[in-house]
Image (spheres, rainbow, N blue to C red):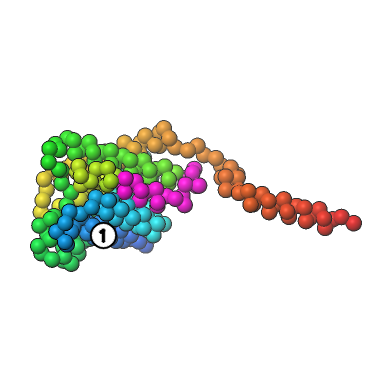
Amino acid sequence: MGNLHETLGINDLKSKNTLWKALLAEFLANVLLNFFGCASCVSATGKPTSFVLIALTFGLVIFILVQTLGHVSGAHINPAVTAGMMSVGNISIVKGILYIIVQCLGSLAGSSVLKALTPEPLHSTGLGNTQLQDDFTPVQGFGVEFFLGFVLVLVVCGVCDPNRPEAKPAAALAIGMAVGVGHLATVDFTGSSMNPARSFGSALIANDWDDHWVYWVGPVLGGIAAALIYKHAFSAPSLGPLKIIERYTTTADEKELKRLDVNRRDENLP
């Protein structure tokens, strides 16, 4: 029974203070993602929105949120990331499900705020709702979103690998760049969702559910595939505490140690 509780994550519910902070962080992160990210898709001037602007906005928002809230919840901000982490046991099932629920609620709240703060004539643009472009079939859209989820979770796994401490300082930037690259490459194909919750909030506000399954099945399966491949094929080997310390030893540290050693020898001279 104890193992079952551990696997499901029932014990996580006992640490209510920590859990609620994490859930609040995931909720707030998705509010901000859908507000700022989807706002970049709306043009108040009537001119077409620049794809570069959209890519930079989503990438920078993710960079900011991961850097700010990563220590609270891990800053998944995406059911595809959460599903990938669940598949390799990095987060419990119960906690993962709660994460996905609040991510969807946060995205809905963010899109709702965006709708409330924009003039009604702009609502016809869909307020950032992701849609397949003309001539793209649902299967093709699924493939695009699969690889978007795949590359995002692969980067997350790589920079958050506990045996690669040197990657941690650049983790938020790398994740934000992965989101930016995904948008630059495919925003004209599927809207480059990468994030089922982000698409859910926009779709509900726009009341447009055409091919919506693409934006859930694609990124989630891509995220799970990336997490499993990374864990079983690419995980960095454990270096042990001494090796990790050595990895962080810099040339300046070595010079300082040598200087102190010379000073000690000089002090011992008659």
Please give the name of the residue rendered at 12% of the width and 60% of the height, measured from the top-left corner: 123
Does 111 appear above or below 242?
Answer: below
> Relative to the observer, which residue lies in front, 99 or 188?
188
Count of marks overlaid on the render: 1
The quarter of the image holding the C terminus is bottom right
Secondary structure type for disc 1: helix
- Which of the 4 image quadrants contains residue 16? bottom left
Residue at 42% x, 42% y is: 158
Q: Is residue 129 visible?
A: yes
Magenta stretch contains residue 167: yes
At label 1, counting other C-alpha atoms closer than 10 Å, the crowd grade (few under 14, some 14-19, many 20 or more) is some
- Taken as a whole, is the magenta stretch helix, strand or loop? helix
Using the rendered image of the protein, determine whether residue 98 is visible from the camera's viewpoint.
Answer: no
Residue drawn where x is 16% and y is 65% of the image: 118
On the image, the x and y values in percent for residue 247 come to 57, 45
The magenta segment is: 162-181
**Label 1 belongs to which residue?**
36
Q: Which residue is the extreme one toward the right? A: 270
Q: Nearer the viewer, residue 268 or 4?
A: 268
Residue 168's place in the image compared with 20, above or below, is above
Q: Quadrant of the N terminus?
A: top left
Magenta stretch holds residue 163: yes
**Residue 37 locus on image (x, y percent):** 25, 56
Residue under the point 47% across and 52% down: 169
Tell me the kind of residue under disc 1: Phe
Percent position of residue 153, x then y = 34, 43
Image coords of residue 207 (percent x, y): 10, 54
Report the side of 81 relative to 142 (left or right).
right
